[in-house]
Image (cartoon, rainbow, N blue to C red):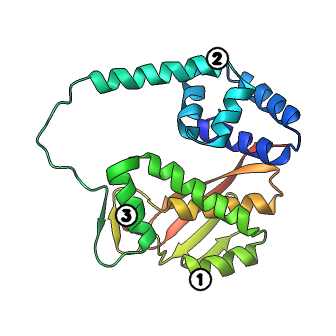
């Protein structure tokens, strides 16, 4: 089952690979039409791409989405009209710092707390993924070498599913949380692995263990999700 992030990723690939605008718009239209009966999915795609060039291309490729965009605006207005109920309860921090943390960890928690909420997960995952793709890392050796310098001590278990272990990950060092929080690391691994398969597949990486929740190391599970060609 597709989710909004997978659809957006496929749209980005079309945008990057199709050289001619006519072909690009046709391919995007064909993709979006597959989900025409899933309004919630398409709304999420529009929300997540709001304010970007890709958003404009989506609307140009598939004009019926203009109506969904209007619905989103109306829903947002309705939410604003609803009175806020004050509980007088203090906000709990999702992640608690227990010492000096990395700048990335601080920025991530700040954005979660004041601006992005749970969207911080998707955004930092995509940042990590895009960074790896742009770096062009396309071998395990390169990935390990880079991550040892910028993330932590990395090892790979070549089993099924592929498992990447990161010890002393800077992204979660001195952080205490109720669930895994290394979204940037997960996205970075996904980007490296997609490079390794020549972007023929989307790769999903999930963090199964995290030092922020008391595990001895961070463990990431990688799986191919969608074949792109």
Going from N to C along the chain, the mark reached first, 2 or 3, is 2
- Residue 162: in sight, yes or no? no
Q: Residue at x 67, y 40 (%)?
A: 54
Q: Secondary structure at mark 2?
A: loop
Specify the label residue 159 is tagged with.
none
Q: 185 above or below 85?
A: below
* In-front residue for pair 7/214: 7
Q: Is residue 136 left or right of residue 40?
A: right
> Do the residues bearing badges 1 and 2 touch, measured as CB atoms within 8 Å?
no
Q: Residue at x 58, y 16 (%)?
A: 67
Residue 25 lies, in percent from the top left, at 80, 31
Specify the label residue 37 is tagged with.
2
Name the residue carrying label 1.
Answer: 149
Q: Secondary structure at mark 3?
A: helix
Q: CA distance from mark 1 to mark 2?
A: 46 Å
**Crowd around label 1: few <14 · some 14–19 · many ≥20 (10 Å):** few
Q: Is residue 85 left or right of residue 16?
A: left
Residue 95 lies, in percent from the top left, at 32, 60
Going from N to C along the chain, the mark reached first, 1 or 2, is 2
Q: Quadrant of the N terminus?
A: top right
Going from N to C along the chain, the mark reached first, 1 or 3, is 1
- Which image quadrant is residue 142 in? bottom right
Q: 212 above or below 23?
A: below
Disc nearest the viewer among 1 and 3: 1
Q: Residue at x 32, y 51 (%)?
A: 114
Name the residue carrying label 3.
Answer: 213
Q: Quadrant of the C terminus?
A: top right
């Amino acid at each position: 089952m597709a989710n909004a992030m997978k659809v957006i990723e496929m749209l980005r690939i079309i945008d990057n690979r199709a050289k001619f605008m006519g072909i690009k718009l046709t391919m995007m239209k064909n993709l979006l039409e597959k989900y025409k009966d899933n309004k919630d999915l398409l709304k999420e795609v529009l929300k997540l791409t709001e304010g970007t060039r890709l958003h404009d291309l989506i609307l140009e490729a598939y004009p019926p989405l203009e109506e969904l965009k209007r619905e989103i605006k109306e829903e947002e207005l309705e939410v604003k009209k609803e009175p806020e109920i004050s509980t007088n309860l203090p906000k709990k921090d999702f992640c608690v710092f227990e010492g000096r943390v990395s700048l990335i960890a601080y920025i991530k928690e700040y954005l979660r707390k004041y601006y992005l909420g749970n969207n911080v997960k998707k955004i930092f995952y995509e940042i990590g993924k895009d960074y790896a793709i742009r770096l062009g890392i396309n071998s395990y050796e390169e990935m390990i070498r880079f991550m040892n310098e910028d993330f932590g001590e990395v090892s790979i278990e070549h089993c099924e599913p592929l498992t990447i272990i990161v010890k002393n990950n800077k992204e979660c060092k001195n952080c205490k949380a109720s669930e895994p929080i290394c979204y940037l690391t997960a996205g970075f691994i996904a980007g490296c692995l997609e490079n390794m398969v020549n972007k023929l597949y989307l790769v999903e990486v999930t963090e199964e263990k995290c030092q922020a929740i008391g595990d001895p190391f961070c463990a990431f599970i990688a799986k191919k999700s969608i074949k792109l060609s």
